[in-house]
Amino acid sequence: MVEDWLVATLARGLAFAAPLLFAALGELVAERSGVINLGVEGMMILGALMAFVVADASASPWLGVLAAAGVGALAALLHAFFAVTLRANQYVSGLALTMVGLGLSGLFGRAYAGKPLAHPLPKWDVPLLKELPWIGPGVFEGQSALLYLGLLLALGLSVFLHQTRPGIHLRSVGENPAAADALGVNVYLVRYLAVVFGGAMAGVAGAYLSVAYRPSWTEGMTAGMGWIALAIVIFAAWEPLRAVLAAFLFGAFYHLAYRFQGVLPPEFLKMTPYLFTILFLVLSALGKSVRLGAPEALGRPYVRGER
Amino acid sequence: MVANDRVSFSVCPGEVHALLGENGAGKSTLVSILYGLLEPDEGEIVIRGQKVRIRSPKDALELGIGLVPQHFLLVKKHTVAENVALGLKGVPFFRPARAVAPRIRELGERYGLPVDPDAYVWQLSAGEQQRVEILKVLVRDVTLLMLDEPTSVLTPQEARGLFEVLRRMKAEGHAVIFITHKLEEVFAVADRVTVLRRGRVVASLSVRETDPQTLARLMVGEELPEPAARPARTPGRELLFVEDLWVRSDRGFYAVKDVSFTLREGEVVGLAGVAGNGQSELIEALTGLRRPERGWIRVGERDLTGKDARVFFEAGVAHVPEDRNRRGVVATLSVAENLVLRHYRYPPFARGPVLDRRAVRRFALEEVKRYDIRTPSIDAPVRLLSGGNVQKLILARELYGEPKVLVAAHPTYGLDVAAARQVHGRILEARDRGAAILLVSEDLEEILALSSRILVIFEGRIIAELAPEEASKERLGMLMAGVAA
């Protein structure tokens, strides 16, 4: 009985964690380059709508995911232009992106509201691994294909950041862009690529919601997940593998809050993501390793020759 | 502003070429141009008979030009190997840091630059970090190496080690450009010297055919001012007591360990040490900016342990901070406002909760004149002032009201000779009227010239106390490096 309950929490927590994971991994890469993008929520919701529209029209959910990555990347490109080239205030630019994303998706999404999606993303079982006790049914059975890709992405990014040449470049640009520049690394290019990648992943996160998790379109369906993703990045101390853990924790909390729907007032339920965000940020602030983990040049535009 | 005005000079393989000049003479601007960090408005650069344009550090590195900057450009959180592998061509995609580690060891041995490739940069001393900067350049097979004020962070022993490295590089056919404002270094290591003054080349000489007096005249352009006077009066009663003081750094370990000393009326006590041996934390504890973990600080009869900065100030402790632009002034506020940053809350500048603007202006006009602060006006923001004038402003503010104790950290760092002399004059003036002064400096000449007693700090402990007669640069250098002497 308890066993079932634990397995269900694991499975449902992960299902809910998948979009958070994608969004957080994307933002993590952007922030590692020294650019903070508060537009995650906006890019996610644009991705969600785009994925639904394309999947609905083409009958291919994968094409929808791809389109979502594209629109997220495009939105992020705009942010990169403001933050990197124009050296505008990154916080203002990111907030604007969130506002615009929420507004645009509401406007163009009206026609799709309430329509079910005929071809959602497939659910996969992982052969062999699903035979494992507890973990098998909890993690490797009946989850969306995207979740598995997200876990692989986290693993890949962790290796990329710490074990590869471009990984060193990315981290150096976020820590000390002047040092990277002095050795001939193109700081602006690295930042552009990182921010655009972040946008694409936020788009995929949105796509997960509209073509996998609940295959339909609802206005405002991201419901603050973009902000949670930002908190996850901090909680994870900018490490991809820790982001998996943090995303799962959020997912599990969220799932449990749903479980207590009967007991708790619905207003409280709506509040939970923000409550958890605050809780996570408080926890993060208490931990020393996290404070030291922040990329040193985070949020600061780079100009050659300035100290 | 024109920082380099029609500068011409050349450097050959197998030669160490010193660029000598005061701060603001345009030396750093010149190497920045050669390294592609700045673009010249006019003129040309010729390398091996080929006219070139250097638009970025990337261009410079491809031409075989490397720079060891004065303020290190290292990623502190990364390892030595990662810093060296950054932007390096021809390293593998996977695990590039592992691939460069043997190269780092090999070059380290060949040139006498030992450093552990797997160490994190933040763990290294300034001297070791400089080795990493040099290795970064060497690994890229440069033919021209430029070093910007490389000895400013080194002990005399470390500096000698660096000169040995430069000699080896010279022997292998590298060209070296060596920026300095210290005459003895020119004679220690350079073959030729180019003297810059106010952005112009005033002379280019073979070192063998010149002497220190000539170079000093060329550099300053006038007769050298008299060196600061030695202490005249005998110290009086004790004003500052520090006992058994333990202070933690930001990273949580003890940066100051079991430090005890006293400062007496009318004396300057020099605190010598290599940067990062606990000076910063000690200074912060003595001025109320950092709470000590254990121990006592008393000023006169008052116990100030654990009190905040305002209480310290009100008890008569003045502070000339080490990072003058960030901690000494508010750069966007005006000269007048910065001058009353300490005293604005007391009469005559305050009348109840209101600021008496006229009193502030009157005071500012007087101080600007008295301290020879060169500013467009007293309403100009402080960020427009040069380092020397910022320092004079800070001294004017801190010495107003005749404080009992002055903690001066690196008061002449980065100042030219004239400004440094003025600063020294003010410090001695304060001493002569009876203030107790702690002079924290890495400039041993400054310490030797002004101090009545000299303390040496190493790894957070005061390891020696010397009278000026028994101290020499050599002996202090050894002590600073932790070698008992």
Image (tube, coloured by chain):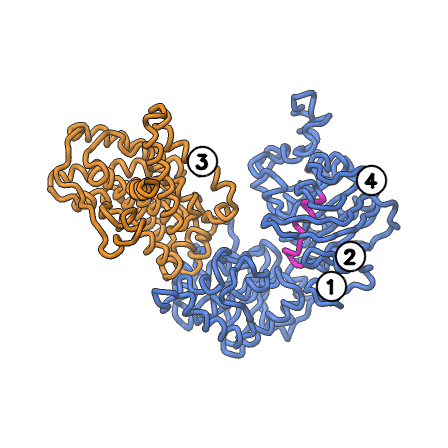
Chain colours: A orange, B blue
Foreground pick, B144 / B350: B350
Secondary structure of the residue carrying numbered label 2? strand
The chain carrying label 3 is A
Verify whether residue B279 appears in magenta.
Answer: yes
- Reading the image, the residue beneath label 1 is B476
Q: Main secondary structure of the magenta part?
A: helix
Mark 1–mark 2 Cα distance, whole angstroms, equals 9 Å
- Reading the image, the residue beneath label 3 is A279
The mark closer to the camera, 3 or 2, is 3
Label 1 in the same subunit as label 3? no
Residue interval drawn in magenta: B274-286
A68 vs B420: above or below = above
In the image, taking residue A111 as reference, residue A22 lies left or right, namely right
Secondary structure of the residue carrying numbered label 3? helix
Residue displayed at 72% across by 46% down:
B294
Mark 3–mark 2 Cα distance, whole angstroms, equals 52 Å
Earlier residue among tags 1 and 2? 2
Secondary structure of the residue carrying numbered label 4? loop
The chain carrying label 4 is B
- Reading the image, the residue beneath label 2 is B454
Label 4 in the same subunit as label 3? no
Secondary structure of the residue carrying numbered label 1? helix
- Label 1 amino acid? Leu
Dividing the picture into quadrants, the one containing residue B482 is bottom right
